Image (tube, grey):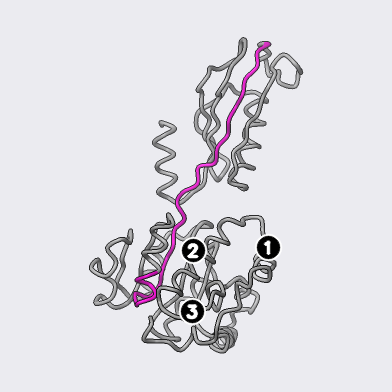
């Protein structure tokens, strides 16, 4: 299997990987300049940069690179330490560049109303792969969402199993009513998505959580949900709300090491105007 073909396959699946490349060689080494090693999310590998302890160290570094999403440059002196032995002491030196290969973030937007229409456009411009889902064909269609990568019309419970939600996914819930919002949130809160957000006032959020608690869903499960959604910028119109939500998503994406609770306190992620709630016409 070709390394580049596998990179494309992994990106389509929404999976992270790291690509290590020998970028400079001095002297004799058990490989060659431009040799590549691909490390997948599950730790499996494709290709080689020569084997031995060098490759083992690069594998460890690749895992770090995937976690931090930051590249790393490493230099090895094969004649310096017998630790690089494995029968491969050649006396040369090599530089290895390890880069993260991160798929475009995927956003699943539930509800195909006015806010979703603006949000799909904003997120597409920001580099997100967007899927818009609604149970109404008259709303979930290509005419309304020409820029979206995927538009799905169908009952939510029937659509859920078809969605490939990963740790790099973002779920935004803006359906046409509180009951539909709750149907989606019930499912979304149990996924591994990086970001789950629901529109509505604090009063609505509390009522929804209480209803889900009655069903046996622990409140702790809801703690990672951003609701009310969006940064506090005084947003009122559908377009402004879309921008505030996109900004919140970017904040979460670009702060991978930040604690969600700490992040929400530092930039007021959960402090959104009460009038964001009962604005059914704006959906």
> What x and y, as percent, mark residue 155?
34, 76
The crowd level at tag 1 (other Cα within 10 Å; few <14, some 14-19, many 20+) is: few
What residue range appears in magenta?
91-118
Return the disc, 2 or 3, that comes first in the chain's sequence: 2
Which residue: 57% across, 89% down? 203
> Is residue 72 toward the left or the right of residue 159 in the image?
right
Which residue: 60% across, 27% down? 96
Return the disc, 3 or 1, that comes first in the chain's sequence: 3
Which residue: 52% across, 64% down? 249
Q: CA distance from mark 2 to mark 1?
A: 17 Å
The crowd level at tag 2 (other Cα within 10 Å; few <14, some 14-19, many 20+) is: many
Which residue: 65% across, 13% down? 92
> Which of the two residues, 213 or 25, is positioned nearer the viewer here?
25
> Which of the two residues, 246 or 261, is positioned nearer the viewer here?
246
The crowd level at tag 3 (other Cα within 10 Å; few <14, some 14-19, many 20+) is: many
Asked which secondary structure carries label 1, the reply is loop
Q: CA distance from mark 3 to mark 1?
A: 22 Å
The circle drawn on residue 170 is: 2
Residue 96 drawn in magenta: yes
Whether residue 222 is situated above or below residue 37 in the rendered picture:
below
Whether residues under marks 2 and 1 lie with C-beta atoms below 8 angstroms apart, the answer is: no
Label 1: which residue?
259
Asked which secondary structure carries label 3, the reply is loop
Label 3: which residue?
199
User: Which circle, 2 or 3, is nearer the viewer?
Assistant: 3
Whether residue 40 is situated above or below residue 242 in the rendered picture:
above
Q: Residue furthest front?
A: 234
Residue 21 drawn in magenta: no
């Amino acid at each position: 299997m070709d390394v580049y073909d596998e990179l494309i396959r992994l990106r389509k699946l929404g999976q992270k990987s790291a690509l290590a490349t020998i970028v400079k060689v001095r002297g004799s080494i058990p490989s060659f300049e431009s040799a590549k090693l691909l490390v997948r999310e599950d730790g499996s590998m494709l290709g080689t940069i020569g084997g031995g302890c060098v490759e083992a160290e690069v594998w460890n570094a690749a895992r770090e690179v995937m976690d931090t999403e930051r590249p790393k440059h490493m230099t090895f002196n094969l004649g310096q330490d017998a630790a690089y032995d494995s029968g491969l002491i050649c006396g040369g030196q090599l530089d290895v560049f390890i880069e993260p290969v991160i798929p475009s973030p995927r956003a699943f937007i539930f509800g195909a109303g006015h806010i979703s229409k603006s949000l799909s456009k904003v997120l597409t411009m920001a580099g997100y792969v967007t899927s818009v889902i609604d149970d109404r064909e008259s709303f979930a269609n290509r005419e309304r969402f020409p820029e979206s990568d995927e538009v799905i019309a169908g009952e939510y419970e029937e659509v859920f199993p078809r969605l490939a939600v990963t740790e790099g996914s973002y779920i935004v819930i803006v359906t046409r009513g509180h009951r539909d919002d709750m149907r989606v949130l019930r499912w979304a809160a149990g996924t591994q998505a990086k970001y789950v957000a629901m529109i509505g006032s604090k009063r609505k959020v509390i009522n929804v959580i209480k209803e889900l608690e009655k069903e046996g869903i622990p409140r702790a499960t809801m703690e990672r949900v951003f609701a009310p959604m969006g940064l506090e910028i005084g947003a009122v119109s559908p377009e402004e709300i879309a921008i505030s939500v996109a900004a919140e998503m970017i904040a979460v994406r670009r702060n991978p090491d930040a604690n969600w609770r700490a992040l929400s306190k530092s930039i007021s992620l959960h402090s959104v105007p009460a009038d964001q709630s009962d604005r059914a016409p704006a959906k």
